[in-house]
Image (cartoon, rainbow, N blue to C red):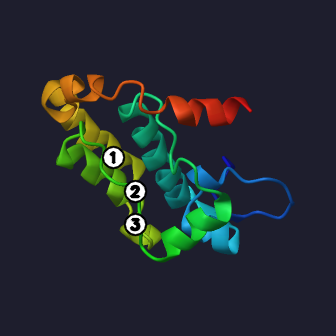
Amino acid sequence: MARDVQEDNVYERKSKGRLPVKWTAMEALLYGTYSTKSDVWSYGVLLYEIFTIGGSPYPRMDGRKIVRCLQQGHRMSKPKHVDEKLYGIMTKCWQENPDERPTFTELRIELKEMENQHKRLINMEMYDEQLHANVEDLVMWEN
């Protein structure tokens, strides 16, 4: 949903079309309002995909169910192989109130501080046990 938002940092969706619901912030889904903070929400979902080595966000859930769950305060659970600190970054991105989400500058600084801790933050031995756990999710995308 990238746009030039230098003027007021917020933009509204005016055209109809399909939305990538699994990556779209709550305020964008509910009210059609986008900002750099809604992009931060999407970035949090991207981090989830990266740290689950391509795991599908909200597997086997349709768009309506995702919106209901988000409104009720539910967020994707912490993958077993991901450290709490790294998962905490994701959940900060998924705060309901956009003003409570970090900026991209803050995210860059926080991730930069963690860059040499990757062996502690992601336990690949634990992940290897479930390496093919998301195969069903991949098959869903092919159909």
Q: Amino acid at mark 2?
A: Cys
Q: Which mark is residue 107?
A: 1
**Label 3 – label 2 distance at C-alpha:** 6 Å
Q: Which mark is residue 17?
A: none
Residue located at (27% from left, 28% from top): 127
Could you tell me if the residues under marks 1 and 2 are in contact, i.e. CB atoms within 8 Å?
yes
- SS state under label 1: helix
Up-down relation of residue 52 to residue 36 (above or below): above
**Label 1 – label 2 distance at C-alpha:** 9 Å
Across and down, in percent, residue 114 comes to: 19, 35
Of the numbered discs 1 and 2, the one sitting upstream in the chain is 2
Q: Amino acid at mark 1?
A: Leu
Q: Which residue is mark 3?
A: 95
Could you tell me if the residues under marks 3 and 2 are in contact, i.e. CB atoms within 8 Å?
yes
Q: Tell me: 11 left or right of 125.
A: right
Is the C terminus in the top left, top right, bottom left or bottom right quadrant? top right
**Local crowd size for mark 3, using a 10 Å CA cut-off: few (<14), some (14–19), many (≥20):** some
**Label 1 – label 3 distance at C-alpha:** 14 Å
Residue 101 seen: yes
Foreground: 78 or 18? Answer: 78
Residue located at (30% from left, 43% from top): 79
Residue 8 seen: no
Could you tell me if the residues under marks 1 and 3 are in contact, i.e. CB atoms within 8 Å?
no
Foreground: 130 or 6? Answer: 130
Q: Amino acid at mark 3?
A: Gln
Q: Which residue is mark 2?
A: 93
Residue located at (28% from left, 22% from top): 128
Up-down relation of residue 25 to residue 117 (above or below): below
